[in-house]
Image (cartoon, rainbow, N blue to C red):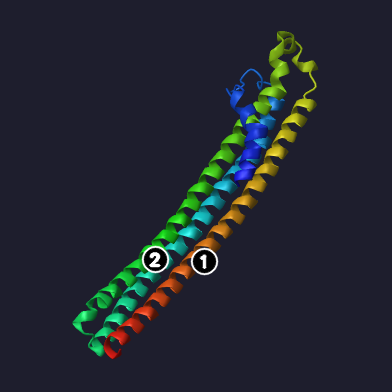
């Protein structure tokens, strides 16, 4: 995503930002151009932009559901680990000299939840990054379309003579230029959706790996503490 947005900014971002993006009321007073922009170009890009926003919301919800499930699971694991370790300590009648090991049971249980929360923070950061990517793509493509419209219709503003001879102007070249710009933007917006979905899948995979690593660490710490408790009694 970073590479793509940098490339788009390099090609279109600066151009779009310096162009005058006012409404070209004079330029598009011609019915043919105005109708084409309103009925073809506008809806075409609006559809892409809405798809990006909808996809972003779906991907966000997917990550949020996974983080919610993992946090709830972590809380259950915390309670189970602590209760199991304390039961073992009580059953073994661990002596006072091993109170530190007994207290460490709470540390292991609480640390597991903290580790899972750290995993969710990384996942939430990916949501923020995807949101920024989507917002920038929508803004850049919208501004560039305005710039393309300005460029395609500039000849109508260049000389008042064109206004007097409006009926003699061949608009096909202007419409063709607008269509070409819209298709190019559509391609980049499609690519941005593909990139975002791939990034979302990678974020979900990293989140799963992070949570798996946290559970494994808790299991190993729990097993090690059980050994220490037995050693306190039987060593």
Q: Are marks 2 and 1 in contact (CB under 8 Å)?
A: no
Which residue is denoted by mark 2 in the rendering?
71
Regarding mark 2 in the picture, which secondary structure is present there? helix
Can you tell which of label 2 and label 1 is closer to the viewer?
A: 1
Q: Nearer the viewer, residue 226 or 64?
A: 226
Residue lying farthest to the front in this orientation: 235
**Vertically, is 126 above or below 170?**
below
Q: Residue at 71% of width from left, 38% of height from top?
A: 184
How dense is the environment of label 1, judged by Cα within 10 Å: few (below 14), some, or many (20 and up)?
few
Image label count: 2
Q: Is residue 166 visible?
A: yes
Q: Residue at 61% of width from left, 41% of height from top?
A: 5
Residue 205 point in image, percent of width and height: 55, 63
Which residue is denoted by mark 1 in the rendering?
209
Q: Residue at 65% of width from left, 32% of height from top?
A: 12
How dense is the environment of label 2, judged by Cα within 10 Å: few (below 14), some, or many (20 and up)?
many
The quadrant of the image that shows the C terminus is bottom left
Q: Residue at 39% of width from left, 75% of height from top?
A: 221
Ranked by sequence position, the earlier of labels 2 and 1 is: 2
Q: Is residue 38 visible?
A: no
Residue 118 point in image, percent of width and height: 41, 59
Q: Nearer the viewer, residue 5 or 138?
A: 5
Report the side of 103 relative to 114 (left or right).
Answer: left
């Amino acid at each position: 995503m970073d590479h793509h947005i940098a490339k788009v900014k390099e090609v279109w971002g600066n151009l779009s930002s310096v162009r005058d993006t006012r409404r070209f009321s004079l330029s598009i007073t011609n019915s043919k151009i105005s109708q084409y922009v309103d009925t073809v170009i506008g809806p075409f890009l609006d559809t892409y932009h809405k798809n990006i926003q909808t996809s972003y919301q779906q991907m966000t919800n997917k990550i949020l559901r996974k983080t919610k499930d993992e946090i709830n699971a972590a809380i259950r694991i915390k309670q189970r680990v602590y209760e199991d370790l304390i039961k073992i300590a009580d059953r073994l009648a661990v002596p006072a000299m091993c109170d530190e090991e007994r207290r460490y049971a709470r540390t292991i249980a609480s640390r597991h939840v903290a580790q899972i929360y750290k995993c969710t923070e990384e996942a939430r950061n990916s949501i923020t990054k995807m949101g920024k990517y989507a917002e920038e793509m929508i803004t850049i493509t919208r501004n560039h379309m305005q710039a393309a419209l300005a460029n395609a219709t500039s000849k109508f503003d260049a000389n008042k003579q064109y206004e007097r001879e409006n009926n003699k102007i061949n608009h096909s070249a202007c419409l063709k230029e607008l269509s070409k710009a819209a298709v190019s933007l559509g391609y980049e917006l499609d690519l941005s959706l593909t990139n975002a979905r791939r990034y979302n899948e990678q974020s979900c995979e990293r989140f799963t790996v992070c949570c798996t690593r946290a559970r494994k660490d808790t299991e190993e710490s729990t097993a090690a503490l059980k050994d220490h408790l037995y050693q306190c009694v039987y060593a």
